[in-house]
Image (spheres, rainbow, N blue to C red):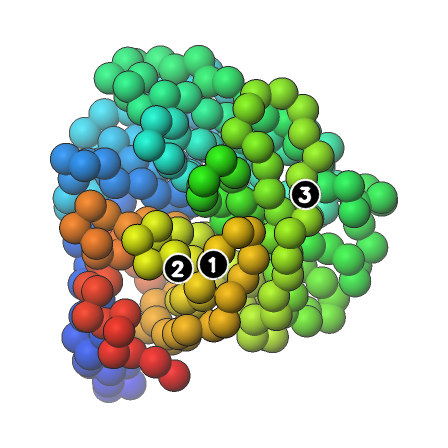
Amino acid sequence: MKSCIGILLLCLSLSACRLSSLGRLPISESSGLWIDSSGSFYSHNDGGNAPLLYELDQKGHLQRSINILAPNVDWEALATDSAFIYLADMGNNLNQRQDLCIYFFPKSALDQKEIQPQKISFYYPEQIAFPAASWQRHFDAEALFAQGDSLYIVTKNRHRPHDGWHYLYALGKEAGPQAARLCDSIQLKKGGLWQSVTAAAYREGEQSLYLLSMRHLYRFSFERGRFGPLEQRIRLPLRQQEALCFGPDAQLYLTTERSILSGAKLWRLRPKALKRLQE
């Protein structure tokens, strides 16, 4: 009886926020997500899996796999600009990696079976110990977005105790080694990893940055590499939300990873819900 009530409440919550499931995904943890102008989705698994980029249809069905000729140490995010796709190998759960990088390649290469990407190697100048001390563990990251001539990383808070602080770093888009530049920081909700940022999406037309955690969707104004005021915070009735992107239809798409109760799924959140649902 309790399980039936729980399912009913979930259905009501999904309906209220105009959040709809598009289908199950053929990968266990969709850590990055992008949709092209034709409506095809691209996603990938996280660390320890094959270095593949998956093309999916509107229901999450696998269309084909593209072999990326680079190791998948811990792939965590996809970002794009007008010409390139950026694939972030920056998962750093233990805060001890010294081989963080972002691979990139032209969108025009997506029709190939194999892609040889270029590579941006980077480090955080503020990290002086590997692993970082328990109260300084903010050198893991799952959120990447492109804006202007820069790539931006929003780090994941693994502090003990968890204090909700996230840090914004910038990189140039050119290949080669770089030092990530600290631009800003922001404190979100406390409460452990459930409140840590797992994805980001920038919407150029409204100069808004959307940050996803496992429980919430946040919207900030964003300009010149700085967080503006928090404009909206939405509690989503999902668990383990992993990836986020805007489609050409201005709708927001996100993924949830596989759990004991359900497989990984692709979701759509309609724009009207973004305007109406606030806590």
- Give the residue pinned by disc 1: 222
Q: Residue at x 50, y 26 (%)?
A: 103
Q: Residue at x 41, y 21 (%)?
A: 105
The crowding category of the residue bearing disc 2, from other C-alpha atoms within 10 Å (few below 14, some 14 to 19, many at least 20), is: some
Would you say residue 10 is visible in this rendering?
no
CA–CA distance in space, label 1 to label 3: 17 Å
**Residue 152 locus on image (x, y percent):** 53, 45
**Residue 266 locus on image (x, y percent):** 26, 52
Residue 208 image label: 2
Left/right of residue 206 with respect to residue 117 in the rendered view: left
In the picture, residue 64 is in which quadrant? top left
**Residue 168 locus on image (x, y percent):** 60, 53
Quarter of the image containing the N terminus?
A: bottom left
CA–CA distance in space, label 1 to label 2: 5 Å
- Give the residue pinned by disc 3: 181
In the picture, residue 160 is in which quadrant? bottom right
Tell me the kind of residue under disc 3.
Arg
